[in-house]
Image (tube, rainbow, N blue to C red):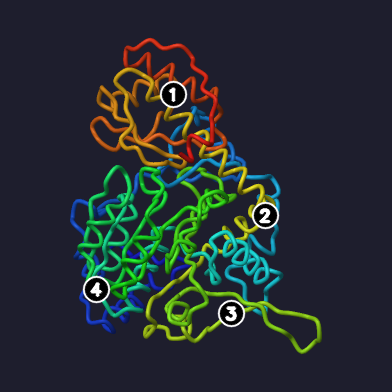
């Protein structure tokens, strides 16, 4: 008989302990817990792993060999993870031991973490034009799902209207999260942005929120936020705006246009793209108890101490969280992505208001330039006429997947395939005019339309018009 394996660091792997746990929950075997997972997705054998390496030096050499196979390509990929500049000081600060190794930051072991996160929240709140910002949660998917859940709880209603084009991964997460107590209803967009008339026609006293994404999944900037907010508020609903703070140095923040809850991701703010990105989600609201008390996340505030002139930093309204209520909490948060909040705080402090303005102008200009150059190619057209920030969709005369593969052979990642002939292209401040011209030349060659390297002067006034 085979002796059951008992892991030295996992006490629950001992047969007697496992049997006791199963008896306590009334299950015959561990397999019962995985009954809802399709058989095709379940691992039934051993993992195909190599033999263990016996020395650290061997492991280091092995990993270097794997990393040495990485290849750098000119990238126009976006779709949620973006290649923005990360100042060296950001990595230096978050690599400090008091930040890097601290789990969440508690009074008995905090070494400035509370204050760092308070400063981050304050800086982001100023950019978003809100008054309360949470300690970061996992990512924008989680943040958006939470923001919509807050609207459902605050209004006691169960319908959510989706007024923008949203990414499939965000939509999937939100649907899973709110399915037990609310429903999503999609309203088709017009020319890339919300159809205000259609949204207004669907509003009623059962609508908890209108969900707007700006920039949208295709990079379109919503221009009717104020009208959407007014219409939503007229029926007692809330406007939830999902956004990326990277462009708010030049774009009007959603909150200044009537949005009640602003949410999104801070990956663009000083966090490397890496292999899919370091992500962290934010939720921001006005200092309104109705909404603040629905926020499940940790909030750090400023408080006086027993020493005159000294201040401390700590949790605000702890009793509203699941940490206090445990299983009776409105929503469970779990581990925060707090380190990325410190990274974003350092980034915002370095950039300052003028830096964010210049960055926003650069993004608008390069986006406009790329659209102009690429749509000048015969057979290539833009999917809509909206103002775009960082991303836009091209309609190609050939299948987009084929075009991407051919350009990949030329060391260019041209974008993300959205449809048979649709390609999502992304440019950032790291994408130069020469990069865009190279993409235009190579795309023209792949499409069989000879083109010279064109140079169009990016004019911000054109973007504004």
First of labels 3, 2 by sequence position: 2
Count neighbours of disc 2 (C-alpha within 10 A) and say few if under 14, some if 14 to 19, many if 20 or more: some
The residue at 62%/43% (across/down) is: 358
- Secondary structure category for the residue under label 4: loop
Task: Judge left or right: residue 368 versus residue 250.
Answer: left
On residue 373, which mark appears? 1
Q: Gap between marks 2 and 4, in whole Å? A: 44 Å
State the image coordinates of residue 176 (x, y, percent, origin top left). Answer: 27, 63
Count neighbours of disc 3 (C-alpha within 10 A) and say few if under 14, some if 14 to 19, many if 20 or more: some
State the image coordinates of residue 282 (x, y, percent, origin top left). Answer: 49, 63
- Secondary structure category for the residue under label 3: strand
Of labels 2 and 1, the one closer to you: 1
Of labels 2 and 4, the one closer to you: 4
First of labels 2, 4 by sequence position: 2
Mark 2, residue position:
95
On residue 158, which mark appears? 4
Observer-nearest of 3 and 308: 308
Mark 3, residue position:
315
First of labels 1, 3 by sequence position: 3
Q: Residue furthest right?
A: 308
Is the Cβ of the residue at disc 2 closer than 8 Å to that at disc 4? no
Q: Gap between marks 4 and 3, in whole Å? A: 31 Å
């Amino acid at each position: 008989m085979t002796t059951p394996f008992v892991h030295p660091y996992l006490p629950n792997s001992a047969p007697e302990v496992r049997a006791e746990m199963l008896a306590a929950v009334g299950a015959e075997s561990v397999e019962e817990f995985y009954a809802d997972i399709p058989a095709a997705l379940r691992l039934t054998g051993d993992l195909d792993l190599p033999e263990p390496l016996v020395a650290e030096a061997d492991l280091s050499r092995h990993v270097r060999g794997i990393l040495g196979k990485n290849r750098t390509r000119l990238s126009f990929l976006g779709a949620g993870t973006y290649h923005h500049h990360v100042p060296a000081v950001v990595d230096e600060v978050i690599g400090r031991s008091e930040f890097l190794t601290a789990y969440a930051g508690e009074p008995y072991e905090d070494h400035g973490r509370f204050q760092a996160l308070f400063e981050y929240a304050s800086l982001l709140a100023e950019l978003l034009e809100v008054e309360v910002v949470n300690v970061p949660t996992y990512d924008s998917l989680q943040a958006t799902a939470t923001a919509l859940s807050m609207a459902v709880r605050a209004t006691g209603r169960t319908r959510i209207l989706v007024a923008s084009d949203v990414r499939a991964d965000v939509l999937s997460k939100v649907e899973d999260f709110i399915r037990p107590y609310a429903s999503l209803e999609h309203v088709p967009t017009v020319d890339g942005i919300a159809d205000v008339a259609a949204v207004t026609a669907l509003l009623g006293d059962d609508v908890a929120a209108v969900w707007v994404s700006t920039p949208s999944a295709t990079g379109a900037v919503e221009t009717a936020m104020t009208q959407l907010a007014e219409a939503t508020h007229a029926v007692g609903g809330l406007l939830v705006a999902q956004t990326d703070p990277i462009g708010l140095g030049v774009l009007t923040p959603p909150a200044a246009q009537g949005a009640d809850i602003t949410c999104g991701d801070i990956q663009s703010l000083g966090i490397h793209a890496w292999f899919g990105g370091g992500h962290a989600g934010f939720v921001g609201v006005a200092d309104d108890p109705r909404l603040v008390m629905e926020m499940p996340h940790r909030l750090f505030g400023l408080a006086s101490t027993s020493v005159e002139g000294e201040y401390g930093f700590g949790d605000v309204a702890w009793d509203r969280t699941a940490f206090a209520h445990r299983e009776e909490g409105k929503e469970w948060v779990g581990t925060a992505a707090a380190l990325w909040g410190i990274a974003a705080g350092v980034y915002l402090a370095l950039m300052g208001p003028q830096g964010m303005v210049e960055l926003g102008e650069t993004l608008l200009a390069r986006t406009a330039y790329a659209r102009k150059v690429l749509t000048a190619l015969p057979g290539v057209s833009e999917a809509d006429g909206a103002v775009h920030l960082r991303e836009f969709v091209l309609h190609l005369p050939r299948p987009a997947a084929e075009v991407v593969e051919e350009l990949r052979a030329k060391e260019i990642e041209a974008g993300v395939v959205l449809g048979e002939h649709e390609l999502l292209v992304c440019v950032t401040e790291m994408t130069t005019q020469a990069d865009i011209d190279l993409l235009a030349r190579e795309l023209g060659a792949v499409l069989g339309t000879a083109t010279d390297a064109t140079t169009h002067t990016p004019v911000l006034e054109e973007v504004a018009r």
